[in-house]
Amino acid sequence: MTIMDRKFALCFTWICLFVLLILVLITNFTDNIFYGELDGQLFSEQTEILDEQLFSEPETKISLKRRSLITEKYKERLNHLQQTCLNSTDGFKGKSTDSDFKFNILIDKQHNLFYCQIQKVGTKFIKDLLRKLSQNHKKDKKDNLKNEWKLSDLNLMMENTDKIMFVREPYSRVLSGYVDKLFAPNNVYWDMSGRSVLKKTRDGANNHSLSCGHDVSFPEFVKYIIKSEKQGQNLDRHYAPLYEHCRPCQISYDFIGKLEFFKEDILFLLDYLNIKHGTNITFSDFESETTESRAIFQSQRLFNMREKLERCVSFFNATMRTWREMQIRGLISIHKQFPFDAEYTESHMTKEDLFVAVKNAISSVQNKSEVKAQRDAALIEAFRLVPTADLYALRRFLKPDCALFNYDSMPMKIFDRPYTDKKSLQYFNLF
């Protein structure tokens, strides 16, 4: 090869490298525009187009994503999530496996619905609503809500479905998981989680506690979450982070609801579903059922578990925990006393007695706002019992959820911590 040939080859190589570099820069630039990293252009452009389409198409043809993007509140939620995902280095993938993810996805092919359930975020209500949609559909009288599908089919299914998820303020969800699974009588979770919590957090725990798992305190529960996360151990889905359930950075959801605005968000969703599917489901269809169904559920659950519960606590204690759980949830006034004493409860109280007592207590509430405020009061009381170091460690655990779904990672009502005398406890004083 001559010197001229070598020079030509070297020159050609440099030209190719330069062209390749230009192509890479162009590709990165266009990717940035596509993913909305440049001042949220993707969402602003979409909204302008959708505004025109909204008035040119019949209501039945307007997708859930379009409705969300032209409604400021829902657009902001989707936009915030997208920007947070794009700014992350790991895409918030978390520790959940494909199997964990698949468990949380429910698909109704008949109505093209894709719902990702997150435990402790109104899942029972939402599933009841979606099932009612199936039952009210004139061509369909069976339950279509299934999670029997192959992960390999996910992309195809997502193209043609309305993708829905609901989230919740992360600190309140932590407390809700504790109250429902460990504070309230629940022999399954006492055995499955309670004993593990005590082994990991309570030095010198007695044999009765270790064998039953019935007396886990909220500070111990928080410490358990922190230690499990630090050790890389997976948590039960009722305690695991929100984002690990639904992979919100990998799936483009069409609607994100929040438990704090539950009725308003459900009404928005119902309006869309009723128009699209020709149904007439109302929120009151469920409200009227809630009081009675809650009373039935509580009485049946307590009596069904009675034999196993009494190996660990008295039946009166279990009943009082059930009553207190409903006070913590803002269903029964904290001033409403349980109507039966210990002797009657242990020896004579029937399932029907408890059902009537619960139903009457819920129905007798005159100031619903005041009783609902008990949720906040219980939250504040519970977190004031948590040592400061553990509270800040919990904040690190909850920070991804707070970032993704735009919640305060340091809410003042929790982090403003005056001294709490344990003798003055109103909600968490049963053990």
Image (cartoon, grey):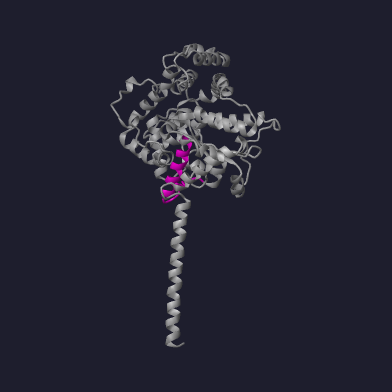
Please give the range of residues in magenta.
73-96
Q: Quadrant of residue 164?
A: top right
Q: Position of residue 93 (x, y in %)?
A: 47, 47
Instruction: In this rendered view, identify the residue nearer to me: 393 or 277.
Output: 277
Which residue is at the far bottom? 2
Horizontal arrangement in the rendering, residue 171 relative to residue 266 (left or right) = left
Instruction: In this rendered view, identify the residue nearer to me: 298 or 88.
Output: 88
Query: Across the whole image, how many numbered discs are drawn on residues?
Result: 0
**Above or below, comparing residue 250 to residue 427 in the picture:** below
Determine the main secondary structure of the stretch shown in magenta. helix
Horizontal arrangement in the rendering, residue 61 relative to residue 96 (left or right) = right
Q: Quadrant of residue 371?
A: top left
Q: Position of residue 182 (x, y in %)?
A: 46, 29
Q: Is residue 140 visible?
A: yes
Q: Position of residue 53 (x, y in %)?
A: 56, 41
| 415 falls in the magenta region | no
Q: Quadrant of the C terminus?
A: top left
Which residue is at the far right? 139
Residue occupying image coordinates x 71% and y 32%: 139
**Above or below, comparing residue 117 to residue 23 in the picture:** above
Q: Is residue 115 visible?
A: no
| 89 falls in the magenta region | yes
Q: Position of residue 407 (x, y in %)?
A: 40, 36
